[in-house]
Image (cartoon, helix red, strand yellow):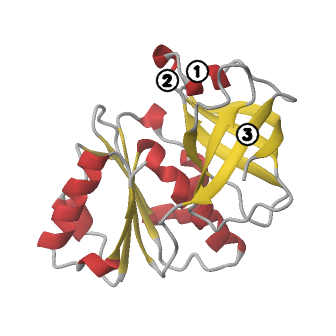
């Protein structure tokens, strides 16, 4: 089923990530961590579907997406940059395998943070953040989506890893076994979302650290 909704607002979260807020269809249901197919209601773009993860909560009266844009590709995300309030989107069916099973370590790469954004917002709202941790990999500090929010939300349980820039207080390089090992004590679940090479490498590290596949919740994007 396809829903036609109007955009309520678009602004920038980072130099290449936008926050898009739109009307919420009356009969759409999702849980934190899920995604939906989206296209632009504009001649030539109606069938160009892209999967975007909800960063709003199921009980809010709007839907929100945090979207990394690629102007050079001249595709859907570049076209989104031409839109404004009042323009329309087509919203398809909800899907997604990432669901919150219990306290754990969230490991994200770049735009792979989006399913965890909704989950952590939900836990915050219901006072269930507990000792959940977030390890977030990016190229530079400027690429970190919602850094201030996650810092205030998680404090020392927010660990940033930068591959292309050395910044005091931030890990440098890639998410490795040493970083994971320092954060996994007492956490029964591991949530992964990011580029496939990153997730495959992290899964291998987790396996070598004795983490079972049943303890890993993952999804590519």
Q: Position of residue 169 (x, y in %)?
A: 36, 48
Does residue 151 appear in the picture of this structure? no
Q: Is residue 142 left or right of residue 65?
A: left
Comparing marks 1 and 3, which lies closer to the viewer?
A: 3
Q: Residues within 10 Å of mark 3 (few under 14, many from 20)?
A: many
Mark 1 → mark 3, Cα distance in angstroms: 17 Å
Q: Residues within 10 Å of mark 2 (few under 14, many from 20)?
A: some
| Image marks 1 and 2: residues in contact by CB distance under 8 Å | yes
Q: In this picture, is 52 found above or below 191?
A: above
Q: Residue at x 36, y 83 (%)?
A: 188
Q: Secondary structure at mark 1?
A: helix
Residue receiving disc 2: 70
Q: Residue at x 64, y 41 (%)?
A: 38
Q: Secondary structure at mark 2?
A: loop
Residue receiving disc 1: 78
Nearest the viewer among 38 and 210 is 38
Mark 3 → mark 2, Cα distance in angstroms: 20 Å
């Amino acid at each position: 089923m396809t829903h036609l909704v109007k955009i309520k607002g678009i602004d920038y979260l980072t130099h290449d990530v936008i926050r898009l807020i739109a009307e919420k269809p009356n009969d759409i249901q999702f849980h934190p961590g899920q995604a939906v197919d989206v296209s632009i209601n504009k001649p030539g773009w109606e069938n160009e579907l892209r999967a975007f993860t909800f960063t709003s909560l199921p009980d809010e009266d709007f839907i929100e997406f945090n979207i990394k844009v690629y102007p050079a590709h001249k595709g859907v995300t570049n076209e989104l940059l031409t839109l404004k309030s009042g323009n329309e989107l087509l919203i398809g069916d909800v899907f997604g395998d990432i669901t919150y099973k219990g306290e754990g370590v969230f490991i994200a790469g770049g735009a792979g943070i989006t399913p965890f954004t909704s989950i952590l917002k939900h836990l915050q709202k219901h006072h269930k953040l507990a000792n959940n941790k977030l390890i977030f990999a990016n190229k530079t500090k400027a690429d970190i989506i919602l850094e201030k929010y996650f810092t205030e939300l998680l404090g020392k349980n927010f660990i940033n890893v930068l591959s292309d820039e050395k910044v005091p207080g931030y890990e440098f390089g890639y998410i490795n076994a040493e970083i994971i090992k320092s954060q996994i004590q007492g956490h029964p679940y591991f949530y992964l979302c990011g580029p496939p090479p990153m997730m495959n490498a992290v899964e291998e590290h987790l396996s070598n650290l004795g983490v079972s596949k049943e303890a890993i919740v993952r999804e590519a994007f």
